[in-house]
Image: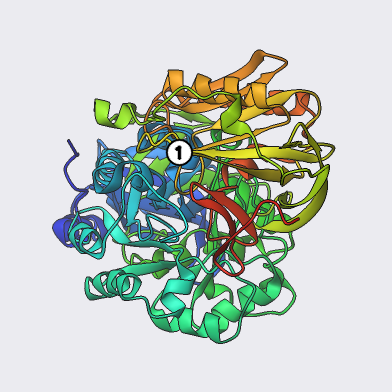
Amino acid sequence: MTQEPFPSWPDVAPQLVNTAAGRTPADTIITGGIWVNVHTREALPDHDIAIIAGRIAFVGPDASHCRGPDTQIIEAQGRYMIPGLCDGHMHIESGMLTPAEFARAVIPHGTTSMFTDPHEIANVLGLAGVRMMHDEALMQPINIFTQMPSCAPSAPGMETTGFEISAEDVAEAMHWPGIIGLGEMMNFPGVSNADPKMLAEIAATQRAGKTVGGHYASPDLGPAFAAYVAGGPADDHEGTCEADAIMRMRQGMRSMIRLGSAWYDVETQITAITERGLDPRNMILCTDDCHSGTLVNDGHMNRVVRHAIDCGCDPLIALQMATINTATHFGLERDIGSLTPGRRADVILTSDLKTLPIETVIARGQIVAQDGTCLVECPHYDWPDTARKTVNMGKKLGGDDFTIHAPHGANGVTANVIGVVENQAPTKALQFELPVTDGRVQATGEVAQIALVERHRATGNVVNAFVSGFGYTGTMAMASTVAHDSHHMIVVGTDRDQMVLAANRLRDVGGGITIFKDGVELALVELPIAGLMSDQPAASIAAKTEEMMQAMRDCGCTLNNAYMQHSLLALVVIPELRISDLGLVDVRTFEFTDVIVS
């Protein structure tokens, strides 16, 4: 079930014209505000906005000629009128919420348009899961545009997913009503090496006149990057430094700079604008991944805009990066992203452009939030059992499943270890000397054990390795069925018995996140839909998420939003070292590597 499509500009052009001319009364007039014009980068005081049929008909110093006896009047009282905020790249599943509950969470923060890539659910449920996300997205009172996932698996041959996305799937989805383009093309070696499947997906998108999302997670800005750009991706969000942002913009891409729950990549890249003085039109703000705790407690795109301003960006430029730049990139400049005639009436009233308090939110001409409270219904899709029963491990696990055997007669070994980097998606490829007891390699000190438990095809397979950087102490384990992008189960722990308890607990509850310490469960976040999402309200999931993060701290972890680091340890398209259901992967070479070096 989806709601009727929102009327297009041509559908309601006669009403817009007649209202602007004063022949037909407006439905709503916002009066006496400061008009923030993102086309010209101006803030113009004492302006009105007249709205009819959910779109803007007139903007000017006096809209009294558009007023009728039944026109709703919203007094701006000298506040700034800014466009609704747009998130240029994000994954709803990272909020651990369905599209409906994600929308309910972000509407009070002023987000009225999202460009979402549901590749998390694609890995679990395939094209059918993407369609479910797409259909619930179209039911919402704000604009949720879906990018068809491009890479499931993200790196063919390096992992096994529940389902695979084909070029034929991409071509089919391009005809769905809410598809805006192709999701991030994570298989960047495939594109650079002219892989026929990757290029076929890009071609299907381009021939449909839609935007190709990028994901170039490599520091190599030489011929490999040039080949990737030549393949067709139009944007990229994996930059981490100024040089990354500059190179992407110079090559005609949009540089998407992100502030998520754990990815802090704005400050190091926005200097291309604030210090180097480059044209800001080709830079876009986005979140990529935000969990529910961030959404409820800190905000969404309003948080990103404030952060960009705190990093020295002019407030009007920061707003452009979160509105018109995004709309233009996706070919929607004539529909969203500015407060000008014909556009959807997505308006925020705020009393300060720097601190950006979100006081009133209007979407499609209706007040949808006031002073932090969502005032509209966000309809739910009826998720079937096929989406709710996805943790298929094949057996109950035991201690032997989490054993790493040492070479015969060894008293110690040198091991390859995944090194977590705080506030960044990349990891480090490290090596540590680890002790051996009774023929088993032991995690010790700052090194914990990590396991990837297959959960799609009931193979019973478990791959074990080591990870450092979390700082865990004592006997503990954390397990999660959120494991980008293949979404098997990741278990990290200092003790095999705790790892057994955590893994089997998620098997029993059907997915989510759990933490055990000394045989006691400290926290549980149940995610019954695809093992990724809950259809409970964001505040409820945020509270459970905070309990989970506190449990991580109680186990010795002090990293900022370490859960996000945990969930990305299987993402085999971001360097340097990752784990998959097929083994330990060196992403620098896209080759498997041994856990035990010697």
Residue type, label 1: Glu
Residue 228, above or below 182: below
Foreground pick, 542 / 417: 417
Q: Residue at x 64, y 56 (%)?
A: 594
Residue 29, x across and y down, in percent: 36, 45
Residue 240, above or below 387: below
- Label 1 Cα neighbours within 10 Å, binned few <14 / some 14-19 / many ≥20: many
Residue 182, x across and y down, in percent: 34, 63
Q: Residue at x 53, y 56 (%)?
A: 572
Query: Seen in the image, is 494 located left or right of residue 105?
Result: right
Foreground pick, 536 / 499: 499
Quadrant of the rendering where the N terminus is positioned: top left
Foreground pick, 451 / 511: 451
Residue 498, above or below 339: above
Residue 64 appears in the picture as rendered: no
Number of marks: 1
Residue 308, x across and y down, in percent: 67, 58
Residue 210 appears in the picture as rendered: yes
Query: Seen in the image, is 379 located left or right of residue 13?
Result: right
Q: Residue at x 33, y 53 (%)?
A: 145
Quarter location, residue 379: top left
Residue 77, x across and y down, in percent: 54, 42
User: For the residue labelled by badge 1, is the local secondary structure a helix, a strand or a loop?
Assistant: loop
Foreground pick, 446 / 305: 446
Query: Seen in the image, is 264 located left or right of residue 87?
Result: right
Quadrant of the rendering where the C terminus is positioned: bottom right
Q: Which residue is mark 1?
A: 454
Give the image's coloring scheme: rainbow
Q: Which residue is most to the front?
A: 409
